Image (cartoon, rainbow, N blue to C red):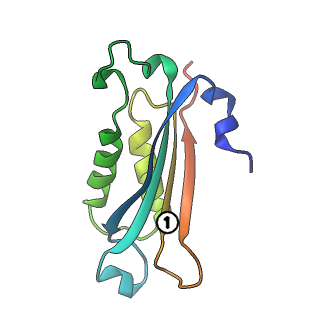
Amino acid sequence: MTSPLLHPQLAGCRRVFLQAYELPVRIGIHDFERHAPQRLLIDVDLFVPLAASTPRHDRLDEVVDYDFIRTVIAERVAQGHVGLQETLCDDIAARMLAHPQVRAVRVATSKPDVYADCAAVGVEVFHLKEKPA
């Protein structure tokens, strides 16, 4: 698989990211996963054109704020139990991509406590807005 970072539509973009955001999340399809939240790690990369993310006056309103990423995740997680990591990744990615300045997004989730013999199990998605006509 080729890295999404090499996609030609991402040339001239700034990467804004949140790494290893740890939250207790109600996620999973098994009965035991429905009784209590699990530790979930979430990574998000937003790709924003430099023209829409280069501050001229060193002000927060000139860029995509990290708080936007955290707020979107918190709002989705607060909606309640989700069965699959795939569903959660897709939901978060769609909400991030709805931001007018975001050209592309990568979302990864991982459950670090599922198996004792590995660091984590997870899912990752990459979505790119269609080129404007």
| Position of residue 69 in the picture relative to residue 93 (left or right) | left
Q: Residue at point 41% right, 41% down? A: 96
- SS at mark 1? strand
Give the residue at the far front of this rendering. Answer: 58
Please state which amino acid type lies under the numbered disc 1.
Ser
Q: Position of residue 61 (x, y in %)?
A: 29, 23
Give the residue at the far right of this rendering. Answer: 1
Q: Position of residue 45 (x, y in %)?
A: 50, 43
Q: Residue at point 32% right, 71% down? A: 26
Tell me if residue 58 comes above or below residue 108 in the rendering. above
Which residue was labeled with disc 1? 110
Quadrant location of the C terminus in the rendered image = top right
Q: Position of residue 103 (x, y in %)?
A: 51, 31
Q: Residue at point 36% right, 44% down? A: 69
Residue 60 falls in image quadrant = top left
Give the residue at the far top of this rendering. Answer: 56
Mark 1: few/some/many CA within 10 Å (<14, 14-19, 20+): many
Tell me if residue 30 comes above or below residue 14 in the rendering. below
Q: How many marks?
A: 1
